[in-house]
């Protein structure tokens, strides 16, 4: 049986094939927004990392120059977390310009 975007055995797998067709259609629709979502995700991680790195640097500098160990420790923690956050950017693939043009 021809379901336009797929073939199904008559009165046996029509429902399943229709569900698969709907799933593919949905995926095709969603995939158009993926490059934009990936780019937004990378931007958010970059901004968050920059925030932690800046705060960490300020705390660390203040802690060392005023000899306040609490500030130094906080600065170190913020810096470490900023680097960890930055490393997570590798997990988000770069949006491929070729794909988004399709
Ligand atoms: Zn079948």
Image: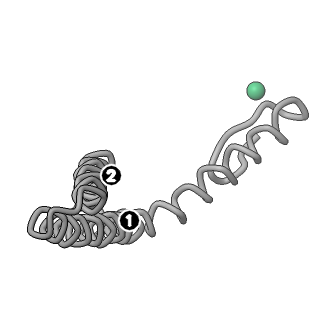
Q: Position of residue 14 (x, y in %)?
A: 82, 40
Give the vertical position of 22 relative to 1 (above or below).
below
Q: Position of residue 2 (x, y in %)?
A: 71, 45
Q: Residue at x 66, y 50 (%)?
A: 23
Mark seen at residue 92: 2
The residue furthest left is: 65
Query: Which residue was labeled with disc 1?
Result: 41
Give the vertical position of 91 relative to 69 (above or below).
above
SS class, disc 1: helix
The residue furthest front is: 67
Q: Quadrant of ligand 1?
A: top right
* Corner quadrant of residue 102: bottom left
89 or 86, nearer to the observer: 86
Residues under numbered marks 2 and 1 in contact, where contact means CB atoms less than 8 Å apart: yes
Few, some or many residues within 10 Å of mark 2 (<14, 14–19, 20+): few
Q: Position of residue 100 (x, y in %)?
A: 30, 68
SS class, disc 2: loop
Q: Is residue 97 visible?
A: no
22 or 37, nearer to the observer: 37
Pointer 2 residue Cβ closer than 8 Å to ligand 1: no
């Amino acid at each position: 049986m021809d379901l336009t975007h797929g073939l199904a055995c008559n009165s046996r797998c029509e429902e399943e094939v229709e569900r698969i067709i709907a799933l593919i259609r949905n995926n095709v629709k969603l995939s158009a927004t993926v490059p934009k979502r990936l780019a937004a995700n990378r931007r958010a991680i970059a901004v968050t990392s920059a925030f932690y790195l800046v705060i960490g640097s300020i705390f660390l500098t203040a802690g060392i120059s005023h000899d306040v160990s609490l500030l130094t420790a906080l600065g170190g923690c913020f810096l470490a977390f900023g680097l960890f956050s930055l490393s997570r950017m590798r997990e988000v693939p770069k949006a491929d310009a070729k794909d988004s043009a399709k």
